[in-house]
């Protein structure tokens, strides 16, 4: 399958690939914003909180359009549901990370476990949020 076709198809595998690409772009944006704000003198915790607001909105737009191919103007219900799902995903990520850390898994493994579980939740939740517009 050609790259362009993969970007347009609505198969689950193609959606997962696009979701992973959006996540990678979001990580880059997140890291860049945090680094820039800390370099400018802001506290790292304030910087991360501000960055997460931007990143959630960024991923809303990209996941809505690219991953799940929703069309038309987004509704406030979509935005609120997406933000709520994202917050739940962040909590899941953190709790899995803490649990993995408590059983003495290496830091990187604990982080990866949290990310994997939370990303799975987010993909399924976002799919439900945008289902009526993408199917």
Image (tube, rainbow, N blue to C red):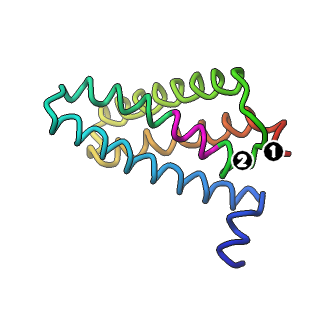
Q: Nearer the viewer, residue 82 or 124?
A: 82
Q: Is residue 42 magenta?
A: no
Q: Residues within 10 Å of mark 2 (few under 14, many from 20)?
A: many
Q: Nearer the viewer, residue 128 or 83?
A: 83
- 77 to 57, vertically: above or below: above
Q: Residues within 10 Å of mark 1 (few under 14, many from 20)?
A: some
Mark number for residue 68?
A: 2
Tag 2 secondary structure: loop
Q: Position of residue 54 (x, y in %)?
A: 44, 33
Q: Earlier in the sequence, mark 1 or mark 2?
A: 2
Q: Residue at x 15, y 39 (%)?
A: 39
Q: Residue at x 53, y 51 (%)?
A: 22
Q: Residue at x 51, y 24 (%)?
A: 87
**Stretch of the chain drawn in magenta:** 57-63
Q: Looking at the rendering, in which quadrant would you find the C terminus? A: top right
Q: What kind of secondary structure does the magenta stretch mostly adopt? A: helix
Q: Position of residue 73 (x, y in %)?
A: 74, 34
Tag 1 secondary structure: helix
- Asked whether disc 1 touches disc 2, contact meaning CB atoms under 8 Å apart, the reply is yes
Q: Position of residue 18 (x, y in %)?
A: 61, 56
Q: Residue at x 31, y 40 (%)?
A: 33
- 87 to 21, vertically: above or below: above
Q: CA distance from mark 1 to mark 2?
A: 6 Å
Q: Nearer the viewer, residue 115 or 133?
A: 133
- Disc 1: which residue: 134
């Amino acid at each position: 399958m050609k790259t362009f076709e993969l970007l347009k198809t609505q198969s689950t595998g193609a959606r997962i690939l696009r979701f992973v690409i959006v996540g990678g772009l979001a990580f880059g944006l997140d890291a860049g914003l945090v680094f820039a704000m800390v370099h400018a003198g802001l506290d790292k915790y304030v910087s991360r909180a501000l960055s997460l607001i931007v990143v959630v909105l960024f991923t809303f737009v990209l996941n809505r359009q690219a991953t799940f191919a929703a069309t038309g103007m987004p509704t406030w219900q979509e935005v609120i549901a997406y933000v709520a799902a994202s917050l739940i995903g962040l909590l899941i990520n953190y709790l899995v990370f803490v649990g993995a850390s408590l059983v003495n898994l290496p830091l990187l493994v604990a982080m990866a476990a949290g990310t994997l579980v939370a990303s799975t939740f987010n993909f399924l939740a976002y799919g439900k949020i945008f289902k009526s517009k993408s199917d």
